[in-house]
Amino acid sequence: MRYVNWRDDVFGQPAGSDPVMLDLLPETYAVTPNENFDHVDRALSDPEIHTLFSSEQIGIGLRLIYSIACSNICFCYTRADGEARRRVLGIQRLEGLYKNYFERYCLAPVQDIGNDHIDSGISYLCYMLWDIFILRPDNASPAMVSAALDVMSSAMQLENDNCIVSAIHGLGHWVTDVPHASEILWQWIHAPTTKNPIVLAYAEQAKTGYIL
């Protein structure tokens, strides 16, 4: 399936749709994990998506890609064939999800912590990414885990509290299984990139592993 057809199906769903209930084209479901990986990577840096689709459609499309409850697309991160380096590279490219989407669209001030649906639903994915995404420490190689931690650490350096909270949330879920996640939180707490007391308190909570 050509990238443009895949992109238009994933991101062209009607505004107001519930991505959990949507049916993509049969051709989209038939795309192999490796082909999905290539399409997802391209979408993370595709400038046309921002002009062709509304922010609400983009939020729906991103949830179709990254939520295991919405489609099989994100399984490419654990099922793609070939060299292990391909999976690691794909995880590293998640930085594009933060910089090109979350940082651009998740603009509401962080006044509390929760999985709300403001910012056309993109903020829901931003906050919940590491909950609803397929990747976990128990299904990833050490190199994949390291790449994911690097993405979270990089997101915590952005000037967007929503991105920072997303990374804190992910690290909080991983601290029990991956000690380095706790180290990243400790380092950030001692040199935070925001003055928002709600975000700072959330980081303190996350290092315990007990988070919302």
Image: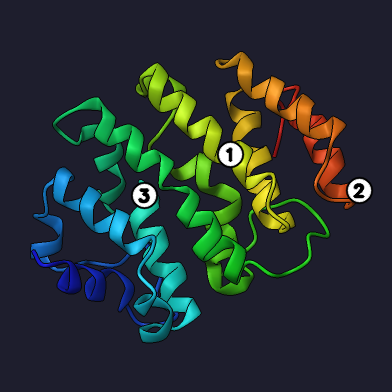
Give the residue type at disc 1.
Met
Helix or strand or loop: what does disc 1 sit on? Answer: helix
Q: Which residue is mark 1?
A: 152
Q: Secondary structure at mark 2?
A: helix
The residue shown at (73%, 31%) is 206
Label 2 vs label 3: CA separation?
A: 33 Å
Q: Which is more N-terminal, label 3 or label 1?
A: 3
Confirm or deny contact between disc 1 and disc 3 (CB under 8 A). Answer: no
Q: Amino acid at mark 3?
A: Ala
Is residue 20 shown to the viewer in this render?
no
Q: Which label is found at residue 69?
A: 3
2 or 1: tag closer to the N-terminus: 1
Mark 2 or 1: in front is: 1
Q: CA distance from mark 2 to mark 1?
A: 20 Å
Quadrant assignment for the C terminus: top right
Residue 11, horizontal then vertical, whole percent: 33, 73
Q: Is residue 141 visible?
A: yes
Q: Measured from the top left, where is residue 208 in percent x and y?
A: 75, 22
Q: Quadrant of residue 54?
A: bottom left
Q: Earlier in the sequence, mark 2 or mark 3?
A: 3
- Residue annotated with mark 2: 197
Which quadrant would the N terminus be assigned to in this image?
bottom left
Question: On the picture, is 141 further left or further right than 56?
Answer: left
Q: Element under label 3?
A: loop
Residue 203 sits above or below residue 125 on the image: above
Label 2 or label 3, whichever lies nearer to me, is 2
Query: Tags 2 and 1 in contact by the CB under 8 Å rule?
Result: no
Instruction: Give the answer, above or below, for where 147 lies relative to 127.
Output: above
Query: Foreground: 28 or 102?
Result: 102
State the image coordinates of residue 187 (x, y, percent, origin top left): 77, 27
Compare residues 5 and 85 and report the one nearer the observer.
Answer: 85
Q: Which residue is at 31% across, 54% downward?
A: 41
